[in-house]
Image (cartoon, rainbow, N blue to C red):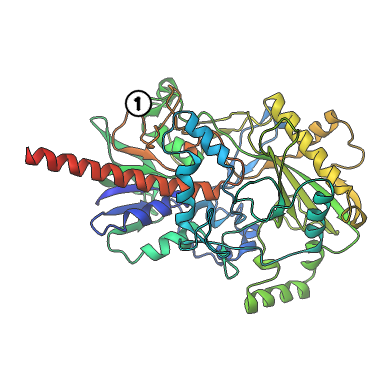
């Protein structure tokens, strides 16, 4: 099979890219996805992440290497293996990050990636239920809505945060991110709006788009220094090939994209040779610069009922299911968190450096069931970690997961910032109207007092908040993997378009930026195609 473009990965960016490129009926696109169709009904129910995370039918079920900063613990790293990618599994939270994040990218020499450049791309894809304004779009494909569920304990947290001196912010995706408020989510009428639902479903009817599921990419086909296609294993395990007359675009995420590059002979030469892989481009930056947000989850036991109590017992669960079936509301329409805060750990910090996720329930992890007592969770994460990890090959076999070393809490700033964030969470818990609702601090507990004890608790309990980025860094220096037009250095006809290209992680959840990157990639590809066409026309005229 041949097409103008072959896209590897139908996640948040890949779905956008396939949709935008095929708006031109003359452009043929093949979209490869290692997972299957998004038929699992729990994908489309907002609270379904309890059922889909750690489910190997839709989740890659990655696991990290032991991490020294976490006292050698290994963490599960869920990533979507299904149409829509991780947007089909995530907590539905729509967060763009801070304007300063993108302006820093521009200051690194990455032309076209400043805030004024990317804001129109966010607005293009957005269908904001509040309507269009300076910061939001209302005509795009991605539904962005307000919470359909509210719970008194989360309202009390927002009020207590204001009592503690933090401003209320009705729109953290607006003029400023600072303050506390409520999450916006990617949902429409109480159903998840994944990238597949938003962008791929409307494009399916186009004859110039071919979607191939259960197609596990094994390597990029390279001839004379140019990417010409992709080799993949189909659902029966047979090796097949598709060819690109234009370009190949990797949109396989911060784990998949560097792995495929390395399997294709693009990466640090000595590492590739150790695995018997022929080197096509010696790019030591492939798999480096890995970043993620680490969360410390404080749990407070309550005097009053929370969602833990609402879901206890068969009769209660039946009532919840009936409410969702009738009105698409209630707990089953809930995103991963309800309230949030973007705050600063010190006055010297220019922009918020910690984020809170406040949940009216508590559990050891999604999928394991809630605690058998009334409680709520306050998760705190550092927004801009300094620590950098790696993705490296364990085998030349594409079926073997790469080695993931996140290297959490490797720097003093990261350790201090997380501890200060935990202390701010405690400060807010002591303010009214929240304090009177709390029976006790369940985690870390009243016996954990000083900074050293708080850090040790974090090392023993903190976990990922599912935002891996940066492993195919965009930049102008020798350690960069792609340039500002997302072209892989040293290989023609090959780009990367997903969160792996971030030179620095954004200050917030990463699904909205991934969709923006898909929008940006489509613009760059279309611009370059038109430029080539014009050059060819001028040459013919001459």
> Element under label 1?
strand
- Tell me: residue 329, above or below residue 513: below
Where on the picture, by quarter, is residue 223?
top left
Q: Is 112 left, or right, of 367 in this rendering? A: left
> Residue reaching furthest front?
134
Q: Which residue is mark 1?
A: 281
The foreground one among 351 and 372 is 351
Q: Residue 263's spot in the image, x, y percent?
A: 40, 34
Density class for disc 1 (Cα within 10 Å; few <14, some 14-19, many ≥20) is some
The foreground one among 147 and 84 is 147
Q: Quadrant where the C terminus lies? A: top left
Q: Is 32 left, or right, of 385 in this rendering? A: left
The foreground one among 67 and 521 is 521
Q: Is 122 left, or right, of 429 in this rendering? A: left
Q: Residue 180's spot in the image, x, y percent?
A: 73, 50
Q: Residue 111's spot in the image, x, y percent?
A: 41, 34
> Residue reaching furthest left?
542
- Tell me: residue 88, above or below residue 381: below
The answer to whether residue 451 is seen in the rendering is: yes
- Tell me: residue 461, above or below residue 148: above
The foreground one among 323 and 107 is 107
Where on the picture, by quarter, is residue 294?
top right
């Amino acid at each position: 099979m041949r097409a103008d473009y072959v896209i590897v990965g139908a996640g948040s960016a890949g779905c956008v890219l396939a949709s935008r490129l095929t708006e031109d009926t003359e452009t043929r696109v093949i979209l490869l996805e290692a997972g299957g169709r998004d038929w699992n009904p729990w994908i489309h129910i907002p609270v379904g992440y309890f059922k889909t995370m750690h489910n190997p039918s839709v989740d890659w079920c990655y696991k990290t290497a032991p991490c020294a900063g976490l006292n050698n613990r290994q963490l599960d790293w869920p990533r979507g293996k299904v149409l829509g990618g991780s947007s089909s599994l995530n907590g539905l939270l729509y967060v763009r990050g801070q304007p300063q994040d993108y302006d820093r990218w521009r200051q690194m020499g990455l032309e076209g990636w400043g805030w004024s450049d990317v804001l129109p791309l966010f607005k293009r894809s957005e269908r904001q239920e509040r309507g269009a304004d300076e910061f939001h779009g209302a005509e795009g494909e991605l539904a962005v809505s307000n919470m359909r569920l509210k719970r008194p304990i989360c309202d009390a947290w927002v009020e207590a945060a204001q009592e503690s001196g933090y401003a209320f912010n009705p729109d953290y995706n607006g003029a400023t991110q600072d303050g506390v408020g409520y999450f916006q989510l990617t949902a429409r009428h109480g159903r998840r709006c994944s990238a597949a639902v938003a962008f791929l479903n409307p494009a399916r009817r186009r004859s110039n788009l071919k979607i191939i599921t259960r197609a596990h990419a094994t390597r990029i086909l390279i001839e004379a220094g140019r990417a010409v296609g992709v080799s993949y294993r189909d659902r029966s395990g047979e090796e097949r090939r598709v060819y690109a007359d234009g370009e190949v675009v990797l949109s396989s995420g911060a784990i998949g994209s560097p792995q495929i590059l390395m399997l294709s002979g693009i990466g640090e030469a000595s590492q590739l040779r150790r695995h018997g892989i022929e080197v096509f481009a010696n790019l030591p930056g492939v798999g480096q610069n890995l970043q993620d947000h680490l969360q410390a989850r404080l749990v407070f036991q309550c005097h009053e009922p929370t969602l833990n109590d609402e879901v206890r017992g068969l009769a209660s669960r039946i009532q919840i299911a009936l409410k969702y079936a009738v009105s698409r509301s209630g707990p089953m329409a809930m995103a991963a968190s309800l309230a949030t805060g973007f705050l600063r750990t010190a006055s010297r910090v220019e922009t918020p450096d910690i984020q809170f996720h406040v949940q009216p329930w508590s559990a050891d992890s999604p999928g394991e069931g809630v605690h058998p007592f009334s409680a709520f969770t306050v998760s705190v994460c550092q927004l801009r970690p300094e620590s950098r990890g790696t993705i490296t090959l364990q085998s030349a076999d594409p079926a073997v997961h790469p080695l993931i070393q996140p290297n959490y809490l490797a720097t003093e700033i990261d350790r201090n910032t997380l501890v200060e964030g935990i202390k701010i969470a405690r400060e807010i818990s002591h303010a009214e109207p929240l304090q009177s609702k709390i029976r006790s601090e369940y985690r870390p507990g009243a016996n954990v007092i000083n900074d050293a004890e708080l850090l040790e608790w974090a090392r023993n309990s903190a976990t990922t908040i599912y935002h891996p980025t940066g492993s195919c860094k965009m930049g102008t220096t020798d350690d960069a993997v792609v340039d500002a037009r997302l072209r892989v250095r040293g290989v023609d006809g090959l780009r990367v378009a997903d969160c792996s290209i971030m030179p620095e992680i954004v200050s917030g959840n990463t699904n909205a930026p991934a969709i923006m990157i898909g929008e940006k990639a489509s613009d760059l590809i279309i611009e370059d195609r038109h430029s080539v066409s014009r050059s060819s026309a001028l040459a013919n005229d001459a």
